[in-house]
Image (spheres, rainbow, N blue to C red):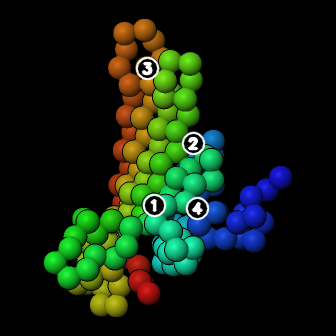
Amino acid sequence: MPDVGEATHSPSAEFMKLVDVEHMSDFDEVVAYLSTNLDKIISEVHGFDKLLIDNEKTQLNCPPAPEAGDSHGSLLIRSLSEVAGPAGLTLKREFKVHDLGVDAENPGKHKVEIREDVVKAPTEEGGGPSYVENVRVVSIIRA
């Protein structure tokens, strides 16, 4: 049965599905989705009177905006999706989205950094984990 958020095309539910480990989607697809839906996702999560939601596959955290003198690194969104096996975690996929401030070259837009970190457990005894990092800075209109 589909998740209610997915059935209603909820921006946060669609994002959570896009970034979960079962749908290892293309990084470019995630960047494109966030470029047009970032503030919709944040507003929706905050509209639930929550900072963290979970669909049993992906956790989505949207911290509150910093207050005067407060900073949490300008973090807008953090998602985490994991797969566990008998010996522990076998795959972890995390996205972090930071607002880097107003884009000096494009007034009215903000520079936003989108980072994906994927860690896979070793496939051979004694081997180390594999690590993939994707980072992109995009200029988008923020609400």
The residue pinned by badge 4 equals 15
Residue 32 vertical placement versus 93 (above, below): below
Q: Is residue 19 visible?
A: no
Instruction: Name the residue type under label 3.
Output: Pro
Mark 1 or 4, nearer chain start: 4
Number of the front mark, 1 or 4 = 1
The answer to which of marks 1 and 2 sits earlier in the sequence is: 2
User: Nearest the camera: 110 or 11?
Assistant: 11
Q: CA distance from mark 1 to mark 4?
A: 12 Å
Find out whether the residues at labels 4 and 3 contact each other: C-beta distance under 8 Å. Answer: no
- Tag 3 residue: 122
Expressed as whole percent of the image width and height from the top left, the position of residue 62 reads 44, 66
Label 3, residues with CA under 10 Å away: few <14, some 14-19, many ≥20: few
Residue located 39% across and 45% down the image:
117
Disc 1 to disc 2, C-alpha distance: 17 Å
Measured Cα–Cα span from mark 3 to mark 2: 17 Å
The circle on residue 61 is 1
Q: Amino acid at mark 4?
A: Phe
Q: Earlier in the sequence, mark 2 or mark 4?
A: 4
Question: What kind of residue is marked 1?
Answer: Asn
Classify 77 as above or below 128. Answer: below
Q: Earlier in the sequence, mark 1 or mark 3?
A: 1
Q: Residue furthest bottom?
A: 108
Q: Residue at x 45, y 25 (%)?
A: 121
Q: Is residue 116 left or right of residue 82?
A: left
Local packing at callout 4 (Cα closer than 10 Å; few below 14, some 14-19, many 20+) is: many
Q: CA distance from mark 2 to mark 4?
A: 12 Å
Do the numbered discs 1 and 3 sit on residues whose CB atoms are within 8 Å?
no
The picture quadrant where one finds residue 29 is: bottom right
Provide the secondary structure element on which disc 3 rests.
loop
